Amino acid sequence: MSFFGRLMLALRFARRELVSGELTILGLALAVAVVAMTSVGFFSDRVERALTTQATQLLAADLVLNANAPVPPALRQEAERRGLAITDNISFPSMVFANGQAALATYKAVGARYPLRGEVTVRRAGGEQSGALRPAPGEAWVDARLARKLGLKAGDRLNVGNLSLKLGGEIVREPDGAMDLYNFIPRLMFNAADLPGTGLMQEGSRARWRLMVAGDDRAVSDYRQWLSQRLPAGARLENVEEARPEIRTALERARRFLGLTAMLTVALAAAAVVLAVRRYLARHWQPVAVLRCLGLTSSEVGWLFVSLFALLGLFCGLIGTVAGYGVQTGMMRLASGFVGELLPEPGIATWLAGPFAALVLLAGLALPPLLAIRQVSPLAVLRDDMPVMRRSLAAPALAIGVLLSLAAWQMGDPALAAWLLAGLAGFLLLVGAMAGAAVWALRKLPSAGFGWRFGVANAARRPWLAVIQIASLSIGLMALLTLTVVRDDLIAAWRQSVPADAPNHFVINIQPGQRDDLRNAFAMAGEKPPELSPMIRGRLLSINDKPLRPSALSDERARRLAEREFNLSWRDSLPEGNQVVSGKWWESRAKPQFSVERGLAETLGIRLGDTLAFDIAGSTYRARVTSLRAVAWDSFRVNFFVIAPESLLGKQPGSYITSFRLPATDEAFINTLVARFPNITVIDVGAILNEVRSVVDKLTRAIEAMFVLALAAGVLVLWATLAATRDERLFDASLMRALGASHRQVRAVVLAELVWLGAFTGLLAAVGAMAVGALAANRLFNLPFEINYMLLPIGVLSGVLVVTVAGWPLVGKVTRTPPMAVLGSR
Amino acid sequence: MTPIDSKTVLLASEVAKQVSFHGQPLSILHSASLRLQAGESVAIVGASGSGKSTLLSLLAGLDRPSSGEVALFGQPLSGLDEDGRALLRRDKVGFVFQNFQLMPQLTALENVMLPLELSGRKDARDSALDMLEHVGLGHRVGHYPRHLSGGEQQRVALARAFVIHPGILFADEPTGNLDPATGRQIIDLLFRLNAEQHTSLVLVTHDNELASRCDAIYRLMDGELTGARA
């Protein structure tokens, strides 16, 4: 036969096999595996593209100096001397006041040439505009959230500190805002020329000063070199290559986690593929013998089936890829608060990866048994028995190898991939042992009825299939129970751990001169005047005169703490809710000394008696640690890592901070407060927590999508196992019917088996979810967590529901086939 | 045995088959010889387990004899490997089986088209439709085997066997799975098609009445083939 003739034959063959439904389970399993892989693949590809090819736009410049103080003029002059374009971007949280209401916003004051790279899109009265745009002096732009919150419309006046600015437009997109990791707080952008007039930049104000630089590659790189030698304290460089490291880390973690769930799905789907291929080949032994009788040579048979499977792989790979793109788009939309609205479209390579993965999966899992079909002798048409296929270690070795390499490729971490597969195998063994014990116990039940006895016996007769069914379904179900029931329990436990009278508002940026006025404002409104604590910013220089080098710290949290500035405070009495766990509270207030929070001390390796040195506003303060404190952080009171007596830090310039509880109905008080003290910033903890919650909700929903895929793969495994035993079941049922069993009795047997499988699956999933919940509460969140025993009935019910609904159509036929139709053909 | 001439379609000379059974050689067929001319029909009769199917598989080239020689259309089968024998079967040999052996995943029409497609025939569809019409199944071409009765399935099998106009047809208990009335219809159809296409026929059966419709009857008993022309 010519090549073309063979190809046409294979195409016709493929079409007929697909239409007849012989390849449905195999095809679905492949498609699910591809959906799981490509949805994660698309996601990471788009994020990667956003981070690299568009990095300059994400930065809105070629190089950014990010500092916690105004950038020294010498650095700016040097950039200009080198012919580079520069501009500023100063951001800080503050209150905005409009229409009689106040709201917290992240202010962003932008310089005359902002943005140096990328485009800003803004919606004005005349429609959307894009380009190197910025608010004119006297004008402010807000994002949709702030506009909604304050009920703003074009032309409204906004009180920004001491200034009144006109609302000029709504920000649709800003280049360096799209990837903000924690943009829980709405945005307000205005011209940097207006910044001094607002009076918001005062001593101790928390702000980021960004010097943005752009120019030709060479000049930027030279300037970067020059600048890196002269970095001011607390400043760091952001450039194209290492744009937003914190986002990169977070996204890398997300990608890994999603990759892990995707591989779980792939591994389950692979089990379904293997089972489906076995059944397919068993059912095709005789037809292939007929083909050989009709004159097809063994190599033509091999070619026919290999090309059939290749076509199937391409077809399902393509379908899976398109579906994967859809899933990924949905996940992106759900996670949009996290990754920003618009990411570049995925590259062509990602589109090709799906069909390629399907082919690799098929080659690894199906090729060895598939090639064995060449050995079918035409003689088999005259014999009913199917010769036993030769078993070798090569086929499972190839399958594991393929799964491992797919997992390594998917997760970019071969060790993690190996652990995942080993964990899965261990889980399978554990479930096997438990299922075996359960079957044994159930068969001993003396009161079991006819259906129950035979149904359980059915499952026991094919123990490995039962184990595979239970294991693969329970993984998906457990993950879903964890994400739904356990997550809600954790949130509830966390809510309960916060005292009912905990403060729900923080006020920062209170200037020393405003202290009395502020207390009066509280008293006049009938509120209890809160305690004000001084807040001074300082950088830890050394421990026992050993300079602190953040880069030398191995612990990531320690590194972060060492890099940023601390909020120090001074006071003479031990703060409420604090407890000295080591050493003593000030014995002599006159003596320079520090009290350090226990957790921070542990992280940075600070012991009682160590000498710490802090740089505060250019002066060095050196003193010994005389006490370590335990702090109840979840009390929501104002707490500090490091406290000194007034005698040491009392003369330092700083601002004040306080926290208070305000009923949710009393918004008016905040509005009055902000109207009277425009420079202070009121942070509504509840509102921010709600923002965080909504982002977490969206993220878990995106992850849920992956676990639904895992459950779908589990259902496919169930189908594949049920289909693999269907002919056998048909025969059993016919025999039973021939012996006089009623429809109802046969149905009871089938139903009992499904119910048993489902119940055991659900039970296992529930126990697993309980364990995950307890572990998370204990280790991750440190919450008092009560195991929700409702998980058991919920798990068992959902298991029974999933298995019977999914399994019934496949086994339902068993009860409908007349006995002779099956027995006669044997 | 007379030498092969152009009219000889099948020539078996002293064909024997031994298998190993629990390590011991077991002789299933001793020295069987048989000749079939173009358009002739022979019946091989014998009780269950007498070795009928073994002989059929050797004559059709589905299996190799332990000794002796089978030649189909003048071509000694011992000179061909399995693939060579497959190519010979593709164009010139038809089969009908007791359990029909239709492809379950193909419709009646697709089953009949299959051998034509294997030969790369462009008119596969039209020829197969004609053939199905000819065996009285023009109205059921789109049905899958599982939706056809036993008699209808065997008609499809006959259509599939005859659609390539084979030089020789091997039929293995073609009525074994059918009730007597349906069986008679199938046999009538088989002999009609055989006569129309001038095909040689090797019919394996345990039904003496059926065998008597052939030109010659061979009897197989305990692996020994005896018999003569009618």
Image: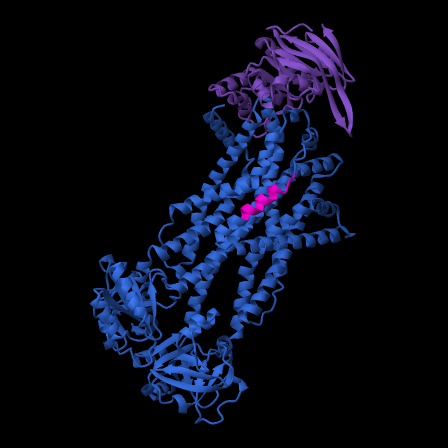
Residue A643: x and y, percent? 44, 85
Q: Which chain is blue?
A: A
**Image vertical order of residue A97 relative to residue B211, above or below:** below
Of residue A528 and residue B155, the one placed in the foreground of this image is B155
Residue A545: x and y, percent? 44, 82
Residue A228: x and y, percent? 32, 69
Residue A448: x and y, percent? 75, 50
Determine the image quadrant of residue A26.
top right
Which quarter of the rendered picture does the C terminus of chain A lie within? top right
Of residue A572 and residue A617, the one placed in the foreground of this image is A617
Of residue A290 and residue A409, the one placed in the foreground of this image is A409
Q: Do we see residue A620 in this rendering?
A: yes
Determine the image quadrant of residue A518.
bottom left
Determine the image quadrant of residue A788.
bottom right
Q: Do we see residue A531 in this rendering?
A: no
The shade of chain B is: purple
Q: Which residues, given as a range, are shown in magenta?
A: A391-403
Residue A394 covered by magenta stretch? yes
